[in-house]
Image (cartoon, rainbow, N blue to C red):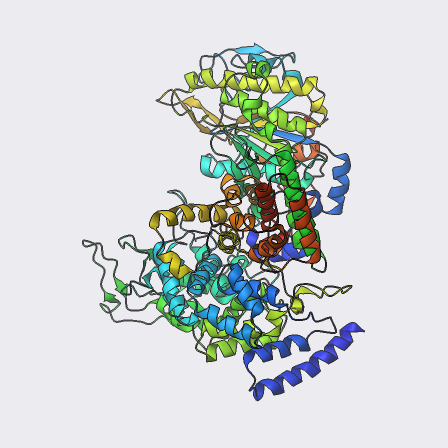
Amino acid sequence: MLYSHLCTPREHHLSRRQMLGAMGGMAAGLGLAGVQAPTFAEDLARNEKQVLLVWLDGGMSQLETWDPKPNTRYGGPYRSISTSVPGVQISELMPHTARQMHNLAVVRTMKTEDPNHSSGVPKILRGQPKDRGVVYPYLGSAVAKLLGPTSTGLPPYVWVKPGSGGFISKHAGFLGAKYGALAVGNGKPPENLVRPESISNADDEARNDLRKRLNERFAAGRRRDYGEANSFVFDLSEKLMQHADLFDASQLPANDVERYGKSEIGENMLLARGLLEAGVRMVHVQSYGWDTHGDNFNAHATRVPRFDRAFAAMMHDLDERGMLDNVLVICMAEFGRTPRINGSIGRDHWNIAWSLAMGGTGIRPGVVVGETNAEGTDVKSQPYDIGHMFHTWYSALGIDSQRTEYHNGNQPLPIAHDDYQPVRELLT
Amino acid sequence: MRAAALQVGFLIISSILLSQSVGAVEPLHQRIDAHIDAASDNWMIAPRSDDAEFVRRIYVDLAGRIPTIEEVRSFLHDSTTDKRGRLIDRLLADSDFPQHMTNQLHIMLMERLGNDPEWEKFLLTSFRENRPWDEMVREMLHANRENEDTRGAAYFLTSRLISEGAMAETDVPGLTRDVSRLLAGQDLQCAQCHDHVSIDDYKQRDFQGLHTIFLNVKQDRTATFPAITEGLMSKKHEFMSVFIQQQEETGPVVPGAGEIEIPVFQEGEEYKVPPDRKKKIDGVPAFSPLETLARELAQQDNAIFRRNAANRFWFLMLGRGLVHPLDVHHSGNPPSHPELLEELGQEFAAHNFDIKWLLKEIALSETYQRTSRLPDGQEPPPREKFLLAHQKRISPEQLFESTLVATGERRTSQAVRDEASKAEDEKTDAFRQQFVKLFANPPREPETEFEPSVQGTLFVLNNAQVQRLFERRKGNLIDRLASLPNENVADELFLSVLSRPPSPDDRADVDAVLAQATDRDSAISQLAWALWSSNEFFLNH
């Protein structure tokens, strides 16, 4: 039968608003603390945790990265190297990351549902909870909702990506467009973020003062909510404009550019560092092109070292600046790649036994969880679903993943798959 | 105490209303006010808007733009007592009205899923000719391919039958849902796989029955315009609740009219036009569930159809439905004023679903004409009471047109614009598209409430093309203001942008800015921008 996912956010659209009451229109555009339940608002005051998600779209090969199987049938040409954690080895394509292993935890027994990009990407990014007829938010929107902006007032969810930028509402699912991503594309600031040079600071201040005075007079005697919502969004925009340089890759310091690597992912990772330092709650760094059905080994020989350099530099800097105490780092894709090498010397989609890595706040550093069999064709110890990981990450952020719920109108929804729990081995 | 009083009051009021509607002779707008006032429940009823507040509102609602300064002045200077009614008549007859209604209904019915010139032509033709609402809906559900002016109505269906990529199935359940939401006011989406969990009225059978009609419907890819083809329906549709695993079946169900019997034909007579694979002709079945849906749904005797129609046009004028949200009609979410909604629906039907007539009656009511400003020290009444005018969302299209009027870029009506040069139109169109992109909701999110956004605000603050509107150019607002002596600037400015004279405080602000200005043009430009970017401009109040 034709059962597409029909129950989408809209069904309780207005009842959701009614629940939010007078604040309904207020958060429009981007999330803010005002719409959180009071308990979250309280948490917010003491919880300045942040998240960095590094997403390797298309599916990075676990065999050329976190789970090498040298000298086996499917192992490929690359060797393993030792890391800063005794006994833990990763691919020789990641020498810089090897020196950061003591800051990382790796899961080698990911076993997930979907081997297709188009459906697999959203499933992994949503943590694939049980189907309740709603479209769940991507991790970034979920964090924006659950934790809101940090005390800096900067937008909570920024997506640093190749290609075009903009305001991407579809990540938000049933949470509503306001929890969508502010996307920085190709290292360029969002459209209209920068004031034209023809308007001086003084002129801008003068005209905005006038606007605010008019707004105050208009508000007198009228229902206040819409006016306040609009004024709030103006304030948020001004905050963004003050930080315009953070969204602009051309402003990055030269020696850091060198260290992170003059590559797309290097540049984007460096932008992400600035955004995290400035106080953006959730930064998602996107790297495309990991779908190596052909020529897998040359492709990884080119791509992994670029990733390695950028990722390791980020881990190093977060560590050096004491930011790993607050920042949760997640590095993953929608799946891994087949051990079997196909006729085009490529590896295909593999959701049966793949790896991901994490580190930072709440995560036990230096551990490797799970083991695959000798040829990497399946898991040898307990398999983990993406649902386990979402529980783990929420726990690392101080969110009780088994008791916290979203409210979609009258419908309470668990924030992560209700059959799974956090993986204790991964948590401090 | 209050609840008890309310109940007694309700009984008295209902009996008054009942007796009134039996021998109703007063025009509908007076009966609207009687219903609303009777349910005021001792809340303060806001007084009538002043002329400036009214003239802005009625232009935005019926012409899709604020009035020009000349139009404001002429209305304010008119001292006749029936000037509001005459203005309403004039705007309903004016050439801006069909284009504005096309925009409004496009937003409501397509929810930014896309657009098609044929669809727009259908809407525009319909509003130019003031075609009845039931007829329009029948075209949307079962378009006449032979009529070039209206065949684009099929876009209502075809736009929802487009597959989003090779792997994605056509979202037929989504189409079913939209037809029910938009034309019957019932969002059955959560009744697709089982009876609705929290709304007792919504049964899986309702969804599946309506769904049955669309299972056979496909986009006609051979047509150069939006068109559909229908397959043969010869047996009932089987479904099963995910809660109760029991096979059930249903024939086509029309909301408000029940299940339709599937006729049985002699062999060879199933088709009006038999299918021909060689010629790639899909054929036309003798029994068309779509035609039946169109006929049985969009008609005077269908209470569900009447109520939804009345509620949606009421919403366009008042900014909130009597049933709210608009697509949640059911017994657990009754209308705020049940008798009023019933009467609106019946009268609308009795007047042959004449949209202009209905809008006029609503506009003539005191309920519509109230101020949105509370008298000092008063608590705002609950929104669903309609005792204080709502501050309505202004659509991206209304905002765009109003912006052009305010800044003096456009001082003419649609009719004159139609003759303007094509190149100019294309440039303007691109600018309009930007407004839509930035101020519209994402697809499938109804645009019912004011939802400011950061991207829109950044556009207001920093967009270069926006800034150019506020630079002095021959004949534009800034140019006009710059050529006036200081003491006349405030009046011209406020009447042009906010459609009202300045208050003493406003005047003081303007005078102070001009007195201190080192660069007068730039100061005027800042003033104009500040008025334009204010909440007062961005709301339809």
Using the rendered image of the protein, determine whether residue A75 is visible from the camera's viewpoint: no
Which sits in the foreground, B37 or A325?
B37
Which sits in the foreground, A46 or A194?
A194
Which sits in the foreground, B446 or A83?
B446
Q: Residue furthest front?
A: B485
Residue B174 lies left or right of residue A400; in this view the side is left
- Look at 68% across and 63% down and name the residue there: B373
Residue A292 lies left or right of residue A106; in this view the side is left
Residue B71: x and y, percent? 51, 63
Residue B195: quadrant of the picture? bottom right
Residue B376: x and y, percent? 76, 64
Residue B208: x and y, percent? 46, 62
Q: Residue furthest bottom?
A: B23
Using the rendered image of the protein, determine whether residue A96 is visible from the camera's viewpoint: yes
Q: Residue furthest right?
A: B1
Which sits in the foreground, A185 or A175?
A185
Up-down: is A220 above or below B512?
below
Up-down: is B105 above or below A54?
below
Which quarter of the image is occupied by the C terminus of chain A? top right
Up-down: is B330 above or below B37?
above
Residue A285 lies left or right of residue A404; in this view the side is left
Residue B297: quadrant of the picture? bottom left
